[in-house]
């Protein structure tokens, strides 16, 4: 789905045929994995004494940074999900 308010989103999705079921399923699975990393980072921000969790959070942050780069798979969808704190990504 296009980002709300995006003028280019819907035409791009239609012209590139990005709304196929198999592609939507792959994108959702990818975003669900990244959502778990995001949630891990959120928990780590509260449990600062847990050094093992902090180490995992650092790795999760690096993974999310890679995911939002232009070379990341589904990077535009990932950036949109991250901007909305993954609240629109179903578990």
Image (cartoon, rainbow, N blue to C red):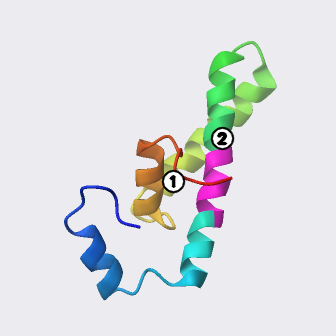
Q: Residue tagged by mark 1? A: 66
* Residue 4: image location, x then y, percent: 31, 56
Relative to residue 27, is residue 40 depicted above or below? above
Name the residue nearer the viewer: 72 or 23. 23
Name the residue nearer the viewer: 38 or 53. 38
Name the residue nearer the viewer: 53 or 13. 13
Name the main secondary structure of what is drawn in magenta.
helix
What residue is at 55 percent from the left and 79 percent from the top? 23
Point out the stretch of residues depicted in magenta: 29-36
Q: Is residue 66 left or right of residue 83?
A: right
What residue is at 54 percent from the left and 48 percent from the top? 64
For label 1, count other residues whose C-alpha is less than 10 Å away and answer few (under 14), some (14-19) or many (20+): some
Would you identify the image quadrant in which residue 7 lies?
A: bottom left
Q: Residue tagged by mark 2? A: 59
The span from disc 1 to disc 2 (Cα, nearest Å) is 11 Å
Farthest-out residue, left? 7
Would you identify the image quadrant in which residue 9 lies?
A: bottom left
SS state under label 2: helix
């Amino acid at each position: 789905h296009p980002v709300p308010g995006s003028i280019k989103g819907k035409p791009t999705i239609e012209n590139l045929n990005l709304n196929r079921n198999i592609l939507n399923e792959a994108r959702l699975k990818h975003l669900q994995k990244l959502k778990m990393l995001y949630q891990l980072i959120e928990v780590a921000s509260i449990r600062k004494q847990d050094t093992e969790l902090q180490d995992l959070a650092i790795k999760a942050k690096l993974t999310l940074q890679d995911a939002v780069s232009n070379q990341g798979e589904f990077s535009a969808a990932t950036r949109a999900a991250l901007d909305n704190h993954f609240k629109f990504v179903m578990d």
